[in-house]
Image: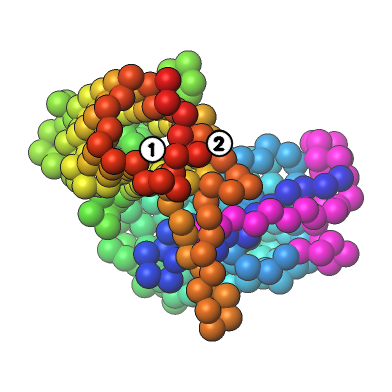
Amino acid sequence: MIIKVRNGSYSFRTGEPTKFEEFEIECKGSGTKDDPATIDSSSIFPEGNIDIVESELYIVIKDLDIKLLTLRHTKNIVMKNCRFTSLMMVDCNYLTIEDSRIYFLRWFGNQNCLVKDSVTEELIRLYKCSHNTFINCEFWNFFTVHEKYCRENKFENCDFSGTLFNPTKDAFEEIKKPGLKSKCSYSINARSSIVEVECIGSGTKENPYIIDNHKLKDLDVREIELFCKRDYVIFKNFDLKFLKLYDTKHITLENCNISKLCLLKFCADIKINFAFIKKLKFGACQDTIIANSDIQEIEIYKGYIPEGSKIKIIDMYQSFGEPITLRNCTYKKIKKESIPAIKIV
């Protein structure tokens, strides 16, 4: 069968995605539980920042030396006898790592995953991870953990003899204790750091997370930056300087003020209602609707990526995306090149 993965290009200065290229990997198997798709040394695995996003296929990756691999919102993947320079797993469930060596292992929001008979040579980092199991593993250098949002992680017959714990060994002991914090929280990047904000809901289409700024205690969230998020979320009553959404879906804003910049890149299913936006920049978006809002300035986003010794301009509208919809909005200035990418109703 054919499995699609992507290779992302990112800004050297800010880390923003500027381009995603899609690759097809031909592999054996049909991707079912009884007949998993197999990616091995006979497969042509591309180089670069390879991402597998939103996959529920049963996949086995084995006998490969992989430089950079990121798994986001995926399930049912087994990695056997592999070596990774960097392996990042974000919001994943039911993934397994066996007989592998990883230089940098970064986990964010993973649950019900298994690592066994494996070595992390430099760094393992856990944030908001729960119900994961490590068996017969070695940790050679740094173990970094945010204990407040990690619980019920098991470590059986693991070797920590050469490990430095950050912040402390006590924090590591905390992540093994039963029970997550009772209040539901959602992670956002704000002012270059991760902030957990209280919310209600479960993040599904039928029961989205609802985050009301009026109900947040002792938090002054003036910037929200989300990358590759897939939960259904409603933000209410925020007074922001910046809203930056990259490769993100299913976000709704209601009654919000964005006093400097609203940036939407590679986004889908974005809804903004009753908002003030000083400047809107967008590119490569789908199913994006802004309604009943006042927008001062609108322009299409043009990304830049290095190409040898020169800088290549990427028109984010061409070949990907669709016009965003402005419904019952007021606006003062629309850049001429943005007009074809806007539908006014």
Q: Is residue 331 above or below residue 20?
A: above
Q: Amino acid at mark 2?
A: Glu
How does the figure colour the protein chain or chains? rainbow
Q: Position of residue 209 (x, y in %)?
A: 37, 26
Report x, y in % for residue 29. 88, 45
Q: Secondary structure at mark 2?
A: loop
Counting residues from the start of the chain, the first of labels 2 and 1 encountered is: 1
Mark 1: secondary structure: loop
Q: Residue furthest front?
A: 336
CA distance separating discs 2 and 1: 47 Å
Which amino acid is tagged 1? Pro
- Residue 138 in sight: no
Residue 264 counted in the magenta span:
no
Lateral position of residue 112 relative to residue 250, left or right? right
- Say whether marks 2 and 1 touch (CB < 8 Å): no
Q: Which residue is mark 1?
A: 178
**In front of the other: 82 or 223:** 223
Asked whether the viewer can see residue 169, the reply is: yes
Which quadrant would the C terminus be assigned to in this image?
top left
Q: Which residue shows up at 31% across the image and 65% down it?
A: 166
Q: How far across and how far down the image is residue 317, in percent? A: 54, 47
The quarter of the displayed image where residue 296 is located: top left
Give the residue number, with chain letter if any, for mark 2.
322
Instruction: Return the residue nearer the eye: 80 or 313.
Output: 313
> Which residues are drawn in magenta?
18-45
Residue 6 locus on image (x, y percent) = 65, 55
Which residue shows up at 52% across the image and 51% down it? 316
User: Label 2 neighbourhood size at 10 Å, few (<14), some (14-19), many (20+)?
Assistant: some
Nearest the camera: 344 or 44?
A: 344
Left or right of 140 on screen, residue 279: left
Query: In the image, what residue occupies the spot 47% across and 29% down?
Result: 343
